[in-house]
Amino acid sequence: MATMTNDAPVAVPRTATGFAVAMLSAVSFGLSGALASPLLDAGWSAGAVVLLRIAGGALVVLPFGLVALRGRWELVRRNLPVVLLYGVLGVAGAQFCFFAALDHLEVGPALLIEFTAPAAVVVWLWLRHQERPGRLTIGGAAVAAVGLLLVLDVVAGFGLHPGGVAWAFGAMVGCAAYFVISADEGNGLPPMTLAAAGLVVGGAVLGLLALVGLLPMDVEATTVEYAGIDVSWWVPLLLLGLLTAALSYVAGITAARMLGSRLASFVALSEVVAAVLWAWVLLGQLPGAWQLVGGVLIVLGVVGVKLGEKSAVEVQQIPV
């Protein structure tokens, strides 16, 4: 497999743009839960929703990915292992394992385990590229972790099923692979092309799982309600494909290349905050006071990680 990311220092304007793009990705990813929830309540299986979401995203991004490739098919052939790994782990693996975990765990603990992915990215960069995190990075990660616990309302308590925990850790591995592979600029693949290829591979894998019966495919042609408004079932599916798959994956890859996998993965923790806010706006599920405090802590933690990255760059620039 080609060498993964090297979190090299980036210019300030690029970093600012990267933060904006990373937040766009997090906000669009966070919308998926609020859009999918009424469909699940109406009788749709999680497998049907996630497969149609990824397949829809692939159909949207594929033409743009082909245009961005500009006939350079040797890039795809040369990076075929990376593309397959991205589609299998970063797209299909993360999605399948997360929904498999929900058969045994509540959403809160499943998300909590999956979003230990930033810590896995830090460890990977440390072991693979000798990029040892500094004190500010570690401190920011700890603050963000506490915020994540509060946003997921862990204080309410929950029981853990061993099988569910195993599936959730599988989702964490897929999520970490998504960030590490997305940040690799050395392969030469345009972000749009990598996103398209990953969604096509991921959709194919999920489709195969559905064919062999490992991914339940229950659908219901009915109306669903968002913010007091009834809409047909195809409306949320269309938005899931356009916003939470096509837009979010392209923006996520672009942000990871601007910020590096470590910082991008911590900014992605904002997805949990966005998910809570979207549930409030669309489903009327009000966040609690501790969840709001947790959101603030996640932001502070991301700032700490960013300051840690800046300090590391300054140390590297000191003449020896």
Image (spheres, rainbow, N blue to C red):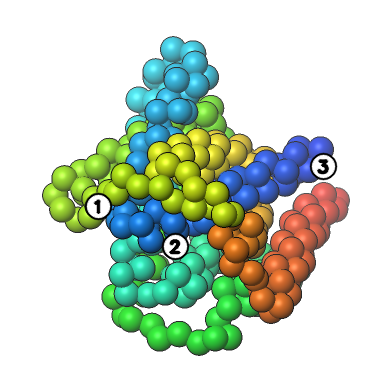
Q: Which of the pair 214/183 is nearer the observer?
A: 214
Can you give x and y, in whole percent of width and height, for residue 199 in the image? Answer: 40, 37
Residue 229 relative to residue 159: left or right: right
Quadrant for residue 103, please give it: bottom left
Q: Amino acid at mark 1?
A: Asp
Whole-angstrom CA distance, mark 2 to mark 3, is: 30 Å
Near mark 3 (Cα within 10 A), the count class, few <14, some 14-19 or many ≥20, is few
Q: Earlier in the sequence, mark 2 or mark 3?
A: 3
Identify residue for label 1: 218
Q: Which of the pair 160/201 is nearer the observer?
A: 160
Mark sitting on residue 85: none
Can you give x and y, in whole percent of width and height, for residue 213 in the image? Answer: 15, 53
Please tell me whether residue 216 is drawn above or below residue 193 in the rendered image: below
Mark sitting on residue 12: 3
Report the mark closest to the observer, 2 or 3.
Answer: 2
For mark 1, give the secondary structure: loop
Can you give x and y, in whole percent of width and height, for residue 232 in the image? Answer: 42, 42
Q: Amino acid at mark 3?
A: Val
Image point (31%, 80%), residue name: 162
Image point (58%, 46%), residue name: 28
Q: Amino acid at mark 2?
A: Met
Mark sitting on residue 172: 2
Whole-angstrom CA distance, mark 1 to mark 2, is: 26 Å
State the residue lying farthest toward the right.
Answer: 319
Report the mark closest to the observer, 1 or 2.
Answer: 1
Q: Which of the pair 168/83 is nearer the observer?
A: 168
Q: Earlier in the sequence, mark 1 or mark 2?
A: 2
